[in-house]
Image (tube, rainbow, N blue to C red):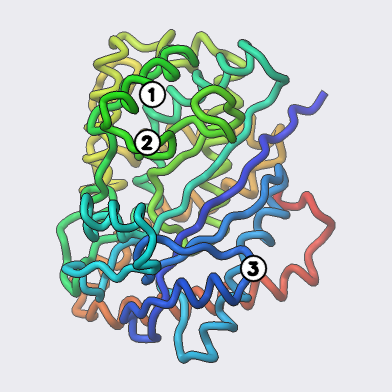
Amino acid sequence: MTTPLLLKGFEVELYTGREDGTVVGCSAEAAAALEGFVTEPDHRNLEYITPPDASYDNQLRLLVEPRQRLRRWLASRQLTLLPGSTLSLGDSHRFERSDPQNPYHGYIEATYGTQVVTASVHINLGLIGGQGPEQMDRLFAALRLMRCEAALLLALSASSPFLDGAVTGAHSQRWLQFPLTPAEVPLFLSHQHYIDWMDQQLALGTMQNVRHLWTSVRPNGDHRPHDLNRLEIRICDLVTDPLVLLAITAFAELRIHQLLRQPAHGDPLKASQLTPAELAALADANDRAAARSSLEATLHHWRDGAAVSAQDWLRAELAALAPLAVELGLATVLAPLHTVLDHGNQAMRWLAGERAGLSISTLLSQEIQAMANQERDLLEAFGTVGPPGSLG
């Protein structure tokens, strides 16, 4: 019997601006005009969400179609979509409210300022198997694994080496500046542990509401903390290439399938030599290291704390995943990760271009055009590719 693929969906944040990379905000107007788009507290970026669908083919279409609608609307205003996860050429010294009357937006501006004015992509993965305690056990085991390997996903996706027209020295400036809330989050041992901890944080005021858990990976559902049906990977920078985004998603999904088949081997709570507190600290330190140096970072493996480069860790996992990828029909979906490992992620390619003498504006302009060209090519391919399922 074939293992079913996980339901998946994406929350995609994008900046809008000019062809030279200058950020120009218009999210309130765009959200009012276009179905499926919502504002962020600062109007320089906006968000769209793809509905849950297990098919990678379908998700590719769901990722591209809203961007095309938004792109057409922006073109009438001489604007376009921008790459990157920070205000690369923007002004991070001022907040530009999308809704001045919204009190929660006022709280965000007063508490965090432009630290939160970033663009990212959140990957939501539903889990296999019914309801009840066993489902929650699987969900939290997957959460622990993704928390301990979130740095690998950031290393693949890093795309924010610039801020305010300057090189920051980090590959993901977004993750270094984003205010993780609460500052320390434990490795959740169970669903009940998560419920008790959430209730405590709300009582202490370290969180304003159940959504105010801003961490690398979190449980998600319609009635948190009690009713949960998916995990949400929040650490990734904006990945403008949808094929790379789907490859990163396939990597996470395959790791979860491995875990579900061999929980004693894949759950850090069972398979690590470290304590839960040590694992949480290790994961957070790995996240910071990946934000600074992405694929070039030295990380520490959750199994024993041993030092390993992000690139070597990823290559080892991809080799181990290869048979399962073939079995589940995901080998083709996963393939773009080898290109990222061989040629660098977005941040690394941009930094190489900057060292070669290209301006940040030139680098952004090139990627803006590459985004548009790729979307056009994908739209043409949608009309000529084989039946759904060719991507998995």
Under mark 3, the amino acid is: Glu
Badge 3 or badge 2: first in the primary sequence: 3
Residue located beneath label 2 in the image: 213
Residue located beneath label 1 in the image: 198
Q: Please state if 234 lies on the left or on the right of 53 as rendered.
A: left
Under mark 2, the amino acid is: Leu
Under mark 1, the amino acid is: Met
- Seen at 28% across and 48% down, the residue is 175
- Distance, label 1 to label 2, CA atoms, is 9 Å
In the displayed structure, 18 sits above or below 88; it is below
**Tag 1–tag 2 contact (CB < 8 Å):** yes
In the displayed structure, 66 sits above or below 226; it is below
Residue 346: image x %, image y %? Answer: 36, 61
- Distance, label 3 to label 2, CA atoms, is 27 Å
Mark 2 secondary-structure assignment: loop
Mark 1 secondary-structure assignment: helix
Residue located beneath label 3 in the image: 35
Give the class, few, some or many, for how many residues have Cα within 10 Å of label 3's Cα (few <14, many ≥20): few
